[in-house]
Amino acid sequence: MSRSLTKLQMQVIGVLWERGEATVAEVQAGLKPNRELARTTVATLLSRLEEKGVVAHRDRGREYVYRPLVTRVEIHRTMVRAFVDRVFGGDVPTMVKELLGSEMVEPDDLRQIRTLLAERQAELDRTASIDNEVDGPAEDP
Amino acid sequence: MSRSLTKLQMQVIGVLWERGEATVAEVQAGLKPNRELARTTVATLLSRLEEKGVVAHRDRGREYVYRPLVTRVEIHRTMVRAFVDRVFGGDVPTMVKELLGSEMVEPDDLRQIRTLLAERQAELDRTASIDNEVDGPAEDP
DNA sequence: CGCAAGTGTCTACAGGTGTAGACTGGCATG
DNA sequence: CATGCCAGTCTACACCTGTAGACACTTGCG
C-alpha cells in the first residue's frame, strides 16, 4: 500500500495533511493558489485516491469529509525509496552527488544537511558499538 | 528537453549509455537479464525516446543504430530536481532527512555523503568569498 | 530465382492520469 | 409547494506508457 503519487495527487493529499480533513470544496479551495480545477475534477481525484487506499471519507450531511490514511512521512519515504531504486539502482551516495551538483542546494541547505547527517551518524555509531560487542571488531584499522 | 524517464525507459537508454550505441536487437539483448521484451516493443520504446529527443539513430544497412543524446548525469539531475520539486516542493533538506530515516543508508554511504558534502561546501565557500570581494554590501554597481 | 530470416512500420489495446460535463437527488428559501 | 443551489456519480476523452501482433520490405542462402 501507499504507492507513489503524482504531483497533483501530492497536492491534493497535501491539503488533507494541512487541515486534517476536508470536503471536496475545501480541497478545491486549498488547491486554488496553484491550480484552478473544476469541482468534479477534485472529486474524481479524491475518489481515485480513495481507491488507492491513501485517503478515506465519512459522510457529514450531504457532503463527504476526506481524511488522509497515510502520513506525509510515510509517503515521502516510500517515494524516496522507489525513486532511488528506479533512477539510481538504490545507490544513495550517487544520488546525493547529483543532487549537490544540480545547483538546487543553497549554503543554508548544506548546513542543515550536515547537521542531519551528523545526527544520523551518531545514531548509527551507537547501534554499531552495540553490534560490535556481539559481532567482534570491524574491518577498520 | 530531457524530461523524466520511467524505469523501463531508464533501462533502455541505460543500455545505450553502456555501449555508446546499439541496434534494437542489441538493446533487446542488453535488457535480457531483467526483462523479456518483444523486439517490436523495444523498437517502439526507442522510437518514443527518439520523439522525446533523448536518443537518435542513424542508418546502418537495414538497421538503425541508436545512440543517447543526453548523458546519464544530465538525466539524473533533471530527474532529481523534478522529484524534489514534485514530492518535497523543492525542499532538499527535508528530502535528505526522509532519506536518512528510510533505512536505506549504510554507514559507508554516510561517510561518502559527508565527504561529498564537505567538498561541495568548500566549493560554495570559495564562490561566496569571491562574490564578497566583488559584490560588497549592495548588489547594484 | 525463391524463400526464410531479419528489420522497421503501423495499429491496437489496456491501464493510469488529468480534466470536466451531464445527470441526479436533497435541502433551503420564497 | 416549487425552484434553484450544491454535492456526489457517471461517463468521456485525450494523452502517456507498456506490450505486442500483423505487415511490408530487403537480403542472404540454397
Image (tube, coloured by chain):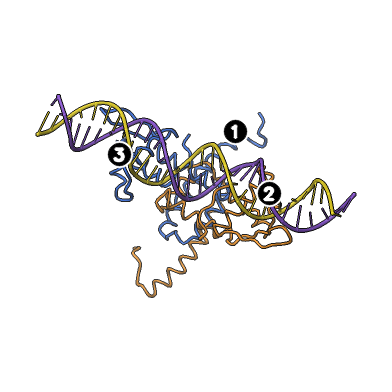
Chain colours: A orange, B blue, C purple, D yellow
| Residue A139 lies in quadrant | bottom left
Both labels 2 and 3 in a single chain: no
Is residue B9 among what the camera can see? yes
Residue type of the residue flagged with mark 1: Val
**What element does badge 1 sit on?**
helix
Numbered badge on residue B134 = 1
Q: What's the distance in space between the residues labelled 1 and 3, CA to CA? A: 46 Å
Numbered badge on residue A82 = none
Horizontal placement of B85 versus A15: left or right?
Answer: left
**What element does badge 2 sit on?**
helix
Name the chain under label 2: A
Both labels 1 and 2 in a single chain: no
**What element does badge 3 sit on?**
helix
Instruction: Specify which label sits upstream in the sequence, 1 or 3.
Output: 3
Numbered badge on residue B19 = 3
Q: What's the distance in space between the residues labelled 1 and 2, CA to CA? A: 48 Å
Numbered badge on residue A28 = 2
Asked whether A63 or B57 is in front, the reply is A63
Q: Position of residue A36 (x, y in %)?
A: 67, 42
Q: Residues within 10 Å of mark 2 (few under 14, many from 20)?
A: many
| Residue at screen point 62% across, 51% down | A12
| Residue at screen point 45% across, 66% down | A125
Name the chain under label 1: B
Residue type of the residue flagged with mark 3: Arg
| Residue at screen point 59% across, 35% down | B133
- Answer above or below: position of A43 versus A141: above
